[in-house]
Amino acid sequence: MTAPTTTQMRREIERIPAVVAELLAGDPAPMEELAAAVRRSRPTWAMIVARGTSDHAAVYGQYLLEAYAGLPTALASPSVTTVYGAPIGWHGGLLVAISQSGQSPDVVSVTAAARSGGAITVAITNVPDSPLGAAARHVIACEAGAELAVPATKTYTAQLAVLARLVASLAPESELPDALPAVAPALRSALSQSDGWLERSVDGGALVDAMAAADRALIASRGFNLATALEIALKLKETSGLFAEAYSTADLMHGPLVLANPDVPLLFVRPDGRMGEAVDLAVEAARARAVEPWIVGGPELPAGARTLRLEDGLPDALTPLVYALPGQLLAERVARARGMDPDAPRGLAKVTETL
Amino acid sequence: MTAPTTTQMRREIERIPAVVAELLAGDPAPMEELAAAVRRSRPTWAMIVARGTSDHAAVYGQYLLEAYAGLPTALASPSVTTVYGAPIGWHGGLLVAISQSGQSPDVVSVTAAARSGGAITVAITNVPDSPLGAAARHVIACEAGAELAVPATKTYTAQLAVLARLVASLAPESELPDALPAVAPALRSALSQSDGWLERSVDGGALVDAMAAADRALIASRGFNLATALEIALKLKETSGLFAEAYSTADLMHGPLVLANPDVPLLFVRPDGRMGEAVDLAVEAARARAVEPWIVGGPELPAGARTLRLEDGLPDALTPLVYALPGQLLAERVARARGMDPDAPRGLAKVTETL
C-alpha cells in the first residue's frame, strides 16, 4: 500500500486556524442571548453529554464550567437514562450536549430527558438540523464546515471554541473574553511550528519515527489539557492503531507510570503556570525512570530537543484550543509513516449508533 | 527472579468475601442515620472525589447515585480546587470522598472546600483517623482491615460495598436492600470458580497465558461495571506492566475497537439484563473483526470456552462487587506468570502525593 503524500485529514487540520478565527469573530449577539437565558434559569449544576471525540470536548467543558462559572459539572453516563431509565432530578441543571453529527441516539435521548425534566438544554453541533438540534431548547452551530476526514479534527477544536465562547459570555468579568482573540494567531503559529518539531531528529529518532515504531504510548497532562491528552491519544488509536493511553499526570503517578519505559513514547502537554508545575512533577518522575518525554507547552517550557514551545500567550484555560493541533498532526503523520491511510482508518465510521 | 507461589495480594483477594460479608452484616444504625442526614440536607446534585483505585469506586458511586438516588453526579477534578482555586457553588451538593488511606492531599483539599462551602460531606476511608476523616463532616469506615498488598484489592470491594449500603439506605424502596445479602455468597462462589476459568485451556492457551504473553489488552463493559473494567485494567497495569485499557463498550465502538486483534486479549464484563444486551453489540463487533473475547458475566451468559458464568442472582447494580474479583486474581496470576512480584510492583507506592 502506498501512503498518500497529503491527506484529507491534514487539509482539515490546516483549516483549523481559519475555522476558529471565524467562529470567534462571529456575531456575539446569539451567544450573549444564550448566556442570558442560562443565567435566568439559575442552574446550580451542569451536565455534559457526548461520545467519542466530542467526549474530550466535554472534559474541557467540565473544567471551564467549574473553574469559570462555579458550576459543579458532571459528564453524563448516557446508559443511566437510556438503559437504566433512572429518574434523574433534572430541575435546576444546565445540560450541554456535544455531537459533531447531532445523530448519536444516546446523546439525543439524554438531551430530551433533561429538557422534559426541566433542565435548560444547549446543543453544540456541526449540524443544527439534526435530531440533537431538535431535542435541545438552544442550539449553537459549530460552523466548522463539513468534516471530510473520518477522524474528527477541526470539529473538535470548533467545539472547544464554542465552549470557550459560551463560558466567556457566562463569565464576562473573567480573563476569557479579552484572551479569545489571541487564539487564532496562536493556532497559526502552532501549525507552522509543528512539522519541524515532529521531524526533529533526536537520540533514537524524531517523534514521528518513535511513535511509528512503537505499539504503545502514554500521553499525559492535567487540568484543562487533560482533554488534549485524551484527544491526542484517541487520534493515535484511530488513525494508527497505536495503543496510546491518556492520563491526568496525577493519576499517572498513582500507578500507570510503571508502564513508562524507553520503548513507550511519553508525551506531556504542559501549560504554563501552576498547572505546568504540577505536570513537572510527572516529568521528573518519568526522568527518574530513565524515560525522556516529549513535551508540548507554552513560553515557560525550557528549550530542549524534544520540546515544542508554543508562543501562545494564552491563559491555561484556552491553551487546549492550540495544543491539540500538533497532536492531531502527529497522528496523521504516524499513520502515514506506518503505511496506513488516515482518511480510511480501519473500522471507524462517522456516526456510531449505540444503545 | 523466582516468582512467589503465593502472594500477599492473593491472600487479600481471598479475604474479600469475608470482609464484604462483615461490612454488609454490620449494625445498620449508623448508615441509616447518615442517610437521614443526607436526606435532610436535600442535595440536588452530588460529586465524588477520589484518586487511583478509589476513582473506580467513584465511577461505581456515580452510577449508583444517579440511578437510585436521582442525583446528577460529577466526578471531581481536584485541580479545579487545588490548582485553579475555582469558586465552586457547593451549596446544595453532596460531596463523597473516597480514599483508602485518607491521605491524598488533593482529595482532602476538595473535601474541606466543599464542607466550608456548604455541601454535606461524607468520607469513605479505611482509616477514619486520617486527614480525610478530619476534613469530612461524616465518616464511614470501610473496616477492611489493613491492606497489606500494594495493589489495592479488598479495599476496592469494601469501598463498593459501603457505597452500595449507603445508596440502599438512601433508596429503601429500591431492590438494593433486599439484594445486599446475596453479595457475599456470590463472592465466595466467584472465588471458587475463578482459578478454573483463568487456567482453562482454549485455542491459543488459557486466559492467564494469553495475558502473560501480550503487551496490550482491552477490558470493556458498560454501566455499573465500567468500574469493574477500569479496576481490572488498572490492576493488570500495576502488577504486570500490561498496557490494559478499559472502555465503555459504547465508547469502544466509537473508535478504539480498531485496536482489537488476535494478539490483543479482549475481556468483556457482561451483566445480565438490558445492559448485557448493550455489551453484546460490542461482543458481536469484536467477533466481526475475528477477535474472540473472554467474558465474565451472569447466569444469562451462554456457556463457552472463554466465558466465566457466575451464578450471582444479583441486580446489575450489585454485580461490580463480584465481577472485579476474577479480574484481580487474573492480575495477580499474570504478574507471577511474567516472573514479577505482585506484592512489589515497580514504582507503586501506597500513598501518592500530588498537587
Image: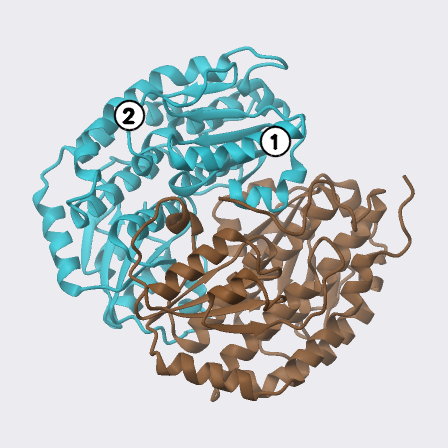
Chain colours: A cyan, B brown
Viewer can see residue B273 = no
Q: Pinpoint residue B334: horizontal percent, then vertical percent.
A: 79, 49
| Image quadrant where residue B312 sits | bottom right
Tell me the quadrant of the picture where the N terminus of chain A can be found: top right
In the structure shown, which secondary structural element does the residue marked by tag 1 occupy?
A: helix
Q: Tell me the kind of residue under disc 2.
A: Gly
Instruction: State yes or no: discs 1 and 2 in contact (Cβ < 8 Å).
Output: no
Mark 2, Cα crowd under 10 Å, few <14 / some 14-19 / many 20+, is some
Q: Pinpoint residue A310: horizontal percent, then vertical percent.
A: 36, 21
In the structure shown, which secondary structural element does the residue marked by tag 2 occupy?
A: loop
| Image quadrant where residue A218 sits | top right
Mark 1, Cα crowd under 10 Å, few <14 / some 14-19 / many 20+, is some
**Residue name at image x 79 percent, y 47 percent:** B335
Q: Pinpoint residue B9: horizontal percent, then vertical percent.
A: 78, 58
**Residue name at image x 78 percent, y 54 percent:** B332
Q: Chain of mark 2?
A: A
Left-right relation of B72 to B108: left
Tell me the quadrant of the picture where the C terminus of chain A can be found: bottom left
* Residue B141 drawn above or below residue B214: below
Mark 1 → mark 2, Cα distance in angstroms: 27 Å
**Residue name at image x 67 percent, y 52 percent:** B350
Name the disc covering residue A286, or none.
1
Q: Chain of mark 1?
A: A
Precedes in sequence: disc 1 or disc 2: 1
| Image quadrant where residue A312 sits | top left
Q: Tell me the kind of residue under disc 1.
A: Ala
* Residue A186 drawn above or below residue B342: above
User: Dot 2 corresponds to which residue?
Assistant: A313
Viewer can see residue A49 = yes
